[in-house]
Image (cartoon, rainbow, N blue to C red):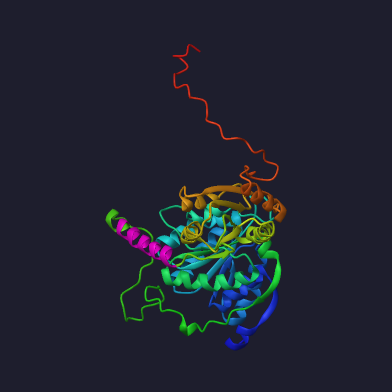
């Protein structure tokens, strides 16, 4: 790896998955534990080849469950550690991720999503939004979730993910998808981090050398009061994250009346549709969340104050992030959804069609081919028992 100056100026053409690996090493990652699964396998293969050359440790575990527990161990010892997988594999890692959160152990988890449920397919999808943002695993916790939309952001955001993990002592996730993981784009690689500049971790189980008491890393609290106190302290950190780490990109939102909300690969398509809408004289804008947790609610407030009257959530699923948009809008504007699933990407023309429908006060189709059904009140429920009805 190059010196800081050369690395800072280095611009290369690389695949998204490989950029994640290279940038992680430059950020100080020296431990990687994983298990192959498409469409992220190139990340692990790159780590296997490169990480030992800089004194790091790569290990292909016997399973995803084993891999995440190795991440737990290396993180508890104070190392900068990462694992990567794709949707079914991340599900298997969920228990270990919860243990890490419960023990306040930092680490980076990469999910290059595939379609689902089940094995689904390896095409682009954003079907793991709920899993990532509603806590990966059991218990009362959250973790920062960063969503890149370009190969350049693969590099930038994983660099930042390690800093967030260390600063707040929490697992942190990069949530990408198969399209961005597999595509190649020019990228400026970040400089190599001076390992001596990384923050000290006095809590780590790295050997006490007789100079301090033993450190204990654990997520088990038999005292109800101790567990409650620990959870409350952790949620105070979550509140700090929400107050300081919301990130987003706003495009043409200063005077936008219709705001398209999209992240990752979907935002690339939405960007073109918004430009085309502007060419038609429609005041459209794009709000691209970069942090999916914490969700950029402040940006929603801002565009509403600027005059936004309608929101359209565009996703590669059947409707997940739209719930966070509705929560943030809180009834101050209308919120509609348009999505494609199974790996079929929407076209800019499809998204533009929905923007035009909103501009003309027509209903939006929730997905391609879906019928627009008028909203009707359900029939009253007959609450009498079968016996009372004489059946």
Instruction: State the residue at coordinates (54%, 69%).
Output: 82
Question: For this rendering, which residue is in front, 254 or 236?
Answer: 254
Q: Is residue 170 above or below residue 345?
A: below
Q: Nearer the viewer, residue 119 or 26?
A: 26
State which quarter of the image contains the N terminus.
bottom right
Q: Nearer the viewer, residue 160 or 257?
A: 257
Looking at the rendering, the stretch of residues picked out in magenta corresponds to 228-244
Extreme residue in the top direction: 390
Please say if 61 is above or below 159: above
Q: Position of residue 231 (x, y in %)?
A: 35, 58
Q: Does residue 238 show up magenta in the picture?
A: yes
Q: Is residue 209 left or right of residue 262?
A: left
Horizontally, is 359 left or right of 327 in the view?
right
Q: How many marks?
A: 0
Quadrant for residue 126, please give it: bottom right
Q: Which residue is at 45% across, 52% downward? A: 138
Q: At which x and y percent is residue 386?
A: 47, 17
Where is residue 45 drawn, in percent x and y? 66, 69
Residue 189 in the image, given as x and y percentages of width and height: 62, 78
Query: For residue 92, what is the image quadrant?
Result: bottom right
In the depicted structure, whether residue 281 falls above or below residue 376: below
Decide which of 307, 177 is in the foreground and name it.
Answer: 307
- Compared with 149, 368 (above or below) is above
**Residue 340 shows in the view:** no
In this orientation, does residue 283 appear?
A: yes
Magenta span: helix, strand or loop, mainly?
Answer: helix
Q: Is residue 56 left or right of residue 329?
A: right
- Residue 136 is covered by the magenta coloring: no
Residue drawn 59% across the image and 79% down it:
190
Quarter residue 23 falls in: bottom right
């Amino acid at each position: 790896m190059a010196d800081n100056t050369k690395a800072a100026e280095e611009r290369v053409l690389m695949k998204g998955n490989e950029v994640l690996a290279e940038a992680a090493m430059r950020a100080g990652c020296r431990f990687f534990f994983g298990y192959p699964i498409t469409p992220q396998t190139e990340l692990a293969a790159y780590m296997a080849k490169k990480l030992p050359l800089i004194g790091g440790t790569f290990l292909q575990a016997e399973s995803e469950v084993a891999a995440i527990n190795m991440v737990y161990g290396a993180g508890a010892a104070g190392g900068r550690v990462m694992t990567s997988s794709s949707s079914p594999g991340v599900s298997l890692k969920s228990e270990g991720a919860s243990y890490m959160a419960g023990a306040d152990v930092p680490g980076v988890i990469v999910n290059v999503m595939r379609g689902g449920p089940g094995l689904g397919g390896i095409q682009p999808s954003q079907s793991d939004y709920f899993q990532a943002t509603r806590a990966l695993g059991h218990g009362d916790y959250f973790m920062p979730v960063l969503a890149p939309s370009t190969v350049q952001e693969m590099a930038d955001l994983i660099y930042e993910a390690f800093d967030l993990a260390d600063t707040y002592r929490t697992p942190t996730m990069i949530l990408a998808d198969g399209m961005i993981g597999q595509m190649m784009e020019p990228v400026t690689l970040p400089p190599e981090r001076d390992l001596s500049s990384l923050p000290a971790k006095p809590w780590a189980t790295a050997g006490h050398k007789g100079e301090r008491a033993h450190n204990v890393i654990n997520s088990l609290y038999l005292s109800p009061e101790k567990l409650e106190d620990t959870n409350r302290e952790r949620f105070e950190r979550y509140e700090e994250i929400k107050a300081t780490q919301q990130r987003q990109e706003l495009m043409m939102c200063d005077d936008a009346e219709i705001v398209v909300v999209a992240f990752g690969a979907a935002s690339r398509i939405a960007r073109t549709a918004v430009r085309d809408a502007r060419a038609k004289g429609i005041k459209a804008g794009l709000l691209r969340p970069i942090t999916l947790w914490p969700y950029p609610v402040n940006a929603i407030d801002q565009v509403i104050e600027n005059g936004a009257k309608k929101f359209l959530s565009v996703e590669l699923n059947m409707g997940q992030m739209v719930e966070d948009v509705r929560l943030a809008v809180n009834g101050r504007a209308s919120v509609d959804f348009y999505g494609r699933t199974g790996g079929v990407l929407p076209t800019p023309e499809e998204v533009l069609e929905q923007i035009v429908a909103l501009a003309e006060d027509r209903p939006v189709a929730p997905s391609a081919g879906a019928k627009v059904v008028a909203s009707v009140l359900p029939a009253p429920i007959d609450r009498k028992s079968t016996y009372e009805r004489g059946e």
